Image (cartoon, helix red, strand yellow):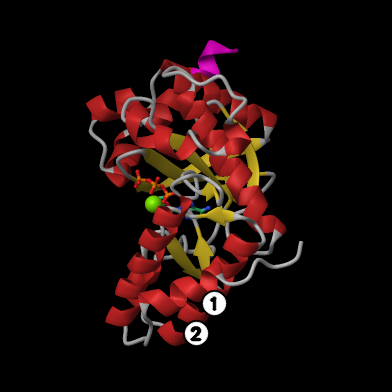
Amino acid sequence: MPEKDVSALETLLKSKEFLYHTNLDRKTADLVFDGRTLKALYELMGRNSVEYIDFPISSGKESVVFKAFSKGKPVVIKVYKLSTLRFANIWKYIEGDYRFSRERIDRSNIVNIWAKKEFTNLKQLRKYKIPCPRPIAFHKNLLLMSYVGTKYAPAPMIKDVKIDFQAIYEQVVEDLTIMFSKAKLVHADMSEYNLLYHRRKAYFVDVGQAVAKDHPAADYFLERDVRNLVRFFSSKGVKCDLESLLKKIRGNPAPE
Ligand SMILES: Nc1ncnc2c1ncn2[C@@H]1O[C@H](COP(=O)(O)OP(=O)(O)OP(=O)(O)O)[C@@H](O)[C@H]1O
Ligand SMILES: [Mg+2]
């Protein structure tokens, strides 16, 4: 790995402008973009022809998300923070999910499994035409996916837009039903923060924690998801209630 290029990347990611947009201070940036992550980022960019990093879209507790360009097209890189991703918090979404039962998991690699899990979940959603980013690659603690947004700005969260909430509600319910009955997944972190509004549709993001529907806690996660949606959409004047919505989503198992 050419040292020079990694240090150029490091200089960019720890530059004043980048830090300003991510709300990271220098010390936190050192934690997020540690040596291992920088090396992984450099490798991911090389393997997937990512030409340059544009700007950070979001910086939260557990990840930093930024826009980049690959072969002239906008893409998104999600960096899971090695320092703050808590083993205990994410273990419960991995243990019990048969798809990952053969992985050897420990503290040192769980974050990599997490990136792989989000990639796998996105792939599964796309298979059933549920609006979400297209997963492109995962590598170590990084996920590369398509960008949801316009030339001017990333798509906003549905909590921040004024739209026809009735129509969006109906689409979300339709897609959640497909997610459950056909993709056989439960999102497990459903809220107005993880739905982006783009081209008159709600796009599902942040699906790392989504579990297979036969996960022992799937029922509990589904109910929590639906409760969150009912709370949000009711506040926007949409008529909905927990019991009937749960019933609709659980419905009759659809044929394969
Ligand atoms: N593919 C994408 N295209 C455009 N914007 C995206 C994309 N993926 C994520 N984002 C933006 O980044 C934000 C954070 O992403 P995400 O929800 O996946 O991370 P997170 O795990 O919630 O991070 P944290 O909980 O640490 O804030 C999203 O709310 C969304 O605004
Ligand atoms: Mg989120």
Magenta stretch contains residue 3: yes
Give whichever of 104, 25 is nearer the camera.
Answer: 104
Q: Residues within 10 Å of mark 1 (few under 14, many from 20)?
A: some
Q: Amino acid at mark 1?
A: Gln
- Asked if residue 201 shows in the view, the reply is no
Quickly name the residue at label 2: 167
Q: Residue furthest right?
A: 256
The answer to whether residue 148 is above or below residue 78 is below
Q: Residue at x 41, y 54 (%)?
A: 221
Q: Residues within 10 Å of mark 2 (few under 14, many from 20)?
A: few
- Asked if residue 132 shows in the view, the reply is yes
Q: Which residues are magenta?
A: 1-6
Quarter of the image for the N terminus: give it.
Answer: top right
Magenta stretch contains residue 126: no
Q: Quadrant of residue 42?
A: top right
Quickly name the residue at label 1: 171
Q: Residue at x 68, y 29 (%)?
A: 47
Q: Are marks 2 and 1 in contact (CB under 8 Å)?
A: yes
Quarter of the image for the C terminus: give it.
Answer: bottom right
Q: Position of residue 159 (x, y in %)?
A: 34, 70
Rounded to the nearest angstrom, the CA distance separating label 2 from label 1 is 6 Å
